[in-house]
Amino acid sequence: MGSRFPSHQLSNGLYVSGRPEQPKERQPTMSSVAMPYTGGDIKKSGELGKMFDIHGDGSRSRKSGPISNAPTRTGSFGGAASHSGPIVQNSVNRVSSSNVGGSGSASMKKSNSGPLNKHGEPVKKSSGPQAGGGVSRQNSGPLAPILPATGLITSGPISSGPLNSSGAPRKASGPLESTSSMKHHAASIVHNQAVTKLTQEDEYSFHKSFPKLILWAMGLLFVMGFIAGGFILGAVHNPILLIVVVVLFSAVAAVFTWNTFWGRRAITGFIAQYPDAELRTARDGQFVKVSGVVTCGNVPLESSFQKVPRCVYTSTSLFEYRGWDSKAANPSHRRFTWGLRSLERHVVDFYISDFQSGLRALVKTGYGARVTPYVDESVVIDINPSNKDMSPDFVRWISERNLSSDDRVMRLKEGYIKEGSTVSVMGVVQRNDNVLMIVPPPEPLPTGCQWSKCILPANLEGIVLRCEDTSKIDVIPV
């Protein structure tokens, strides 16, 4: 054609304007030759039909057509089918899917066309778990990973674990734990180094706070006074010394008894009257009292009996009353008194937001720190032989700890500090770079004598925690 515009001739003899397009390189796995229409007869498919016709009689069903990266396997027919490889976009509309003949045997293999290996055999790629019926699937090309039953794609590597209904490993977007794993998780938290385990020695006791040397010296003096008073009374018949010794002994015994029963209440009153400090102006190394709202740290706790989540302090104690012929809860349990049988008390590091300045400080009560708690019990359950089986929660609790309840009078107390509670913390301020912390003091804090209340001095060791339960203690008659 004599024209100044470039033109070229197509394969069918038609001349069109423009330069011929350069042939694009196609990947071998993504290319396919358009097959002629065969009307569903496998004998007319040439070499491709011979490859799929295993028995030579055309009885094997064939289904050709485009497939995606994740082949669809929702067919309800029982015969084995074969899929052709990936089809390019411009030939998708010219290829149709057809099913020829009856359904084949369930033991036939499912084959696909695709690249060959060095031995001339089709490359076999497994697409996942096998469907029922013993059918073996062979797919060509890259396949998408198996999705969970919900179809949700989750991040992270596929780990071994329980299988879903289709036989694939179950993956979830969040932590899914069974009851046994939750128990194991709770036990691992309790035995974590970040959790401080408190004992009965860590709570206030007048007999523990009073100096032992002074106590033994006073006891020795009273013994000597009684001996001298009795000797003088028998020798000269003068009871004055004995009367003086008896009066002094009665007064000292009354003071000791008063401090034993009212000492804890006096300590909580001392903590309440201690002035609050402002963290913004507190110096490094200053002993302060801070009141604010609690926020959990990295290791939250859970209460033992009520299963209250996200706690920073938990305490569950079981007491038993010993009568005349009852069993002792512990070796030092005396008759007609309540004795401690079991105690679970734990505390971890937490944050406190100061009411005065609004600053947040890290309270270092975990990792074995010295802590003196003054936390009110939030629940009290009284158990006796007539109603011990009426509380399933209590039966579960004692069975988990292998404790017997053989006709014993028991009382279960539980206290906790959960996230959002208001507490008062007494400790030493420590500033490390930009981190504000409250750590245990190196020396105990003396409370001094409260003469108006006849309270003797006591020492507060470590970090002092005070949480007052605004609600009354609930007595659950089970």
Image (tube, helix red, strand yellow):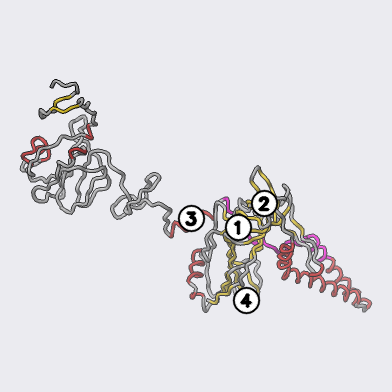
Q: Are marks 1 and 4 in contact (CB under 8 Å)?
A: no
- In this rendering, which labeled residue sits more in front, label 4 or label 2? 2
Residue 136 coordinates in the image, percent (x, y): 20, 45
Secondary structure at badge 2 equals strand
Give the labeled residue for mark 1: 294
Give the spatial CA distance, label 3 vs label 1.
23 Å
Is 384 on the left-hand or right-hand side of 235? left
Is 206 on the left-hand or right-hand side of 186? right
Q: Is residue 323 visible?
A: yes
The answer to if 299 sits in the magenta stretch is no
Pick the front one: 80 or 291:
291
Residue 143 coordinates in the image, percent (x, y): 27, 42
Secondary structure at badge 1 equals strand
Q: Examine the rendered structure and indicate whether residue 351 appears above or below residue 268.
A: above
Give the labeled residue for mark 2: 438
Give the spatial CA distance, label 2 vs label 1.
13 Å
Give the labeled residue for mark 4: 323
- In this rendering, which labeled residue sits more in front, label 1 or label 4? 1
Q: Residues within 10 Å of mark 3 (few under 14, many from 20)?
A: few
Give the spatial CA distance, label 4 vs label 3.
39 Å
Q: Are marks 2 and 1 in contact (CB under 8 Å)?
A: no
Mark count: 4
